[in-house]
Amino acid sequence: MPRRAPHLEPYEVFRQEKDGDPMRHGGSVMAPDPELALHYARELYGRRQESTRLWIVRRADIGVLDDPDWLQPPLDRSFKKPGGYVMREKLGQARARTGRPKGVPGGGHSPARDEA
Amino acid sequence: MSLDAGLAPGTRSALEALLLAMADDEFVIGYWDSEWTGIAPLLEEDVAMSSIAQDEIGHARAFYGLLGELTDRDPDTTAYDRPPESFRHCRLVDHARTDWAFTIARRYLYETADAVRLAALEDSSFAPLAGLVAKIQREERYHLAHAEGWLRRLAVARPEGRTRLLAALRTLAPDAATVFTRLPDEATLVEAGVMSAGTADQAVVWRAGLEPLFAQLELPLPGAAADPATGRTTHSDGFRWLYGEFTAVRYMDPVAAW
């Protein structure tokens, strides 16, 4: 009797490390059905008590958007990024008003934003 | 100092026999299933079965440890320094591993039986056992779900999967109920509340629990044990081979510290 390889398909596994954390992509497993995918995800991404929750999603069920015309349009869209709006002078003036030097927290802006 | 279980000597020795039987069951099935490492049907299953086998050996370690507290014996000594004939695992787990369908058939029969046995111990008057059982039950739920998932798959995988599953169930049928082999002086355990039901009553609960799924999948229910008196005392050449495997490293240097 010829042996058929089991029909396997990929499932993407998302994991949460502790309560309240966001679900993050952990990796994927190959499985012949959703139930075994659950078991394999448990063994590969949860057997060491490293996860409090797993999401196991059949890769074929994921809506994929990777069209460059949608995501990477050719025209300059830099004005849609915060960096397109120069804050440096305004921030400098604000710091002068409050007397708080650069880099000290509490100014309502994260340092990363201040640099933008 | 051995643990004072607050039990009469007869009950205490019966408890020791119970712990040894459970430890040996988990130890032997754990070792059989660990033989799939590297050769399971697919890579993910290789990890899953190896991990489950490891869990079972972990449960065995816990039972040997509790037994050791009663007897002042080191768990490793109990596990590895006995001759094969003094093992008290049941004949269901004594059979050689053979194919995947056999492993799944055995795992399902064993996990369902073990669940009934653990349920009879969850309110044990011997508190350390009740505590340990509560932890083990949480892991066994997952093991049972894994075995059931595969049993369902194989039962409908015509022709080869189902043919192999039926052959495995035929081989195992006379020994399936040996998990419930009567333990020495087990009546004293029930009387002392160590165990809430005797093995014969547990076997009835187990069979009733198997019925719906076996009927749904049109699988033959295993009958009573063919030779109930020797369910935990006669061992096969298959087991003697496994014994040679699992003691091989130990015997290279019996006094080595790991």
Image (spheres, coloured by chain):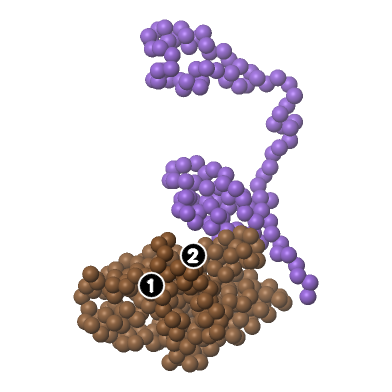
Q: The N terminus of chain A lies in which quarter of the figure? A: bottom right
Q: Chain of mark 2?
A: B
Q: Is residue B173 left or right of residue B1?
A: right
Q: Which residue is at 47% across, 54% downward?
A: A48
Q: Mark 2 sits on what residue?
A: B54
Give the crowd class for mark 1: few <14, some 14-19, many >=20 residues within 10 Å.
Answer: few
Identified by mark 1, the residue type is Thr
Name the tint of chain B in the rendering: brown
Identified by mark 2, the residue type is Gln
Q: Residue B33, image x and y in percent?
A: 55, 70
Labelled disc at residue B186: none
Of residues B253 and B220, which is closer to you in this image? B253
Q: Which residue is at 63% across, 60% downward?
A: B43
Labelled disc at residue B77: 1
Pointer 1 or 2: first along the chain: 2
Q: Residue B195, image x and y in percent?
A: 32, 78
Q: Quadrant of residue B73?
A: bottom left
Q: Which chain is purple?
A: A
Q: Is residue B2 left or right of residue B159?
A: left
